[in-house]
Amino acid sequence: MNEPLVCVSFEGVTIEEILEEAARANLAGADLAELRYDRFFLIRPEEDEDDVREEEEGDEDLVIDEMLWDRRSIGDIEVGEIIAKLKDGIPLPVIFTCRPTDEGGFYPGDEKSRIAILEQAIESEVSWVDLELSMNSKKRQKLVAKAAENGVKVIASVHGTDGVPDADEIIEIVRSNAENGDLVKCCYRTSNHQASLAIIDAAEALKDEEIDSALMGLGPGGDWTRIHAPLLEQTMVYTTLRNDFKLYEEGLINVKDVRETWILLEY
């Protein structure tokens, strides 16, 4: 039973925050890190005294909705500068992601400018690049070819924000896109634990096939495939540096906790 790669997805919105997260992720034993370039366009709101008090008291009704945060304009962020500043500061292999809003991301620009950003990231020779399967097929193929030229691995990703398809559909997505990347990632928004069973069923059905995949949910039960990733022969598991008490409700798991869980379960 092989242990999956453990990836920490950075949640910072500034270079300083990312470098701090990178140091913590490295110390926590992460194998690689996901740099969400689209998050640099988020403007973190200043907390007022009431928010700070509620957080300290553990108010269960306090919800952070990043989709409501203000955004920087395209001209305020320059990908080359960010990559240059972070390249020597992140001691882990990096997955470069620039997620569009229709797949749950924060990038405020058009697709043409987003593709140009992905091209720059590939040319900088990041370790991995995340290319959504929803992209225009011809443009995506050009990016895949450029990635091959620069020794960059490709994640072929799907992010469902409207619920979880049935297991057979997930299985078909993975099988039919095995040649479209070095790893197929499927992440779905779950509304309840029952919905998450489809992800588990798909992972179980695919575990004996020679396809590198990472299947997961965001929401109740979304952490099941992360927790049982070695048993389900998942290639990669996405984790967080956060350790909120109710992290499991978001379907997430802390980077240290996931490996401790695998040891506890004797995986």
Image (cartoon, rainbow, N blue to C red):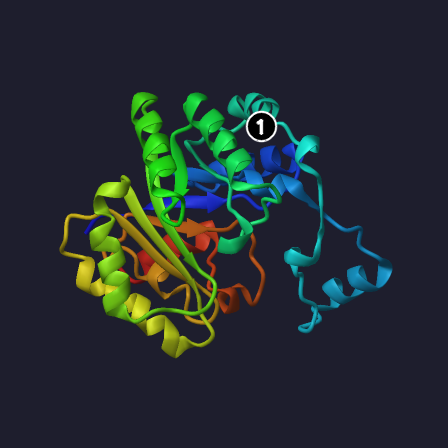
Determine whether 186 is above or below 54 in the image: above
Quadrant of the rendered image containing residue 68? bottom right
Determine whether 70 is above or below 26 in the image: below
Q: Is residue 267 visible?
A: no
User: 180 or 113, which lies in front?
Assistant: 113
User: Dot 1, crowdedness within 10 Å: few (<14), some or many (≥20)?
Assistant: some
Quarter of the image that includes the C terminus: bottom left
Determine whether, in the image, residue 198 is placed left or right of residue 107. left
- Which percent across, then down, holds residue 258? 40, 55
User: 213 or 21, which lies in front?
Assistant: 213
Determine whether 199 is above or below 15 in the image: below
- Please state which amino acid type lies under the numbered disc 1: Val
Q: Residue at x 28, y 40 (%)?
A: 181
- Which percent across, then down, holds residue 55? 73, 63
Q: Residue at x 66, y 73 (%)?
A: 60
- Which percent across, then down, holds residue 216? 37, 59
Q: Residue at x 35, y 25 (%)?
A: 146
Determine whether, in the image, residue 193 is placed left or right of residue 79. left
Q: Residue at x 34, y 42 (%)?
A: 137
- Which percent across, then down, holds residue 23? 55, 34
Disc 1 on helix, strand or loop?
helix
Q: Which residue is mark 1?
A: 79
Determine whether, in the image, residue 154 is placed left or right of residue 81. left
Q: Is residue 226 visible?
A: yes
User: 145 or 110, which lies in front?
Assistant: 110
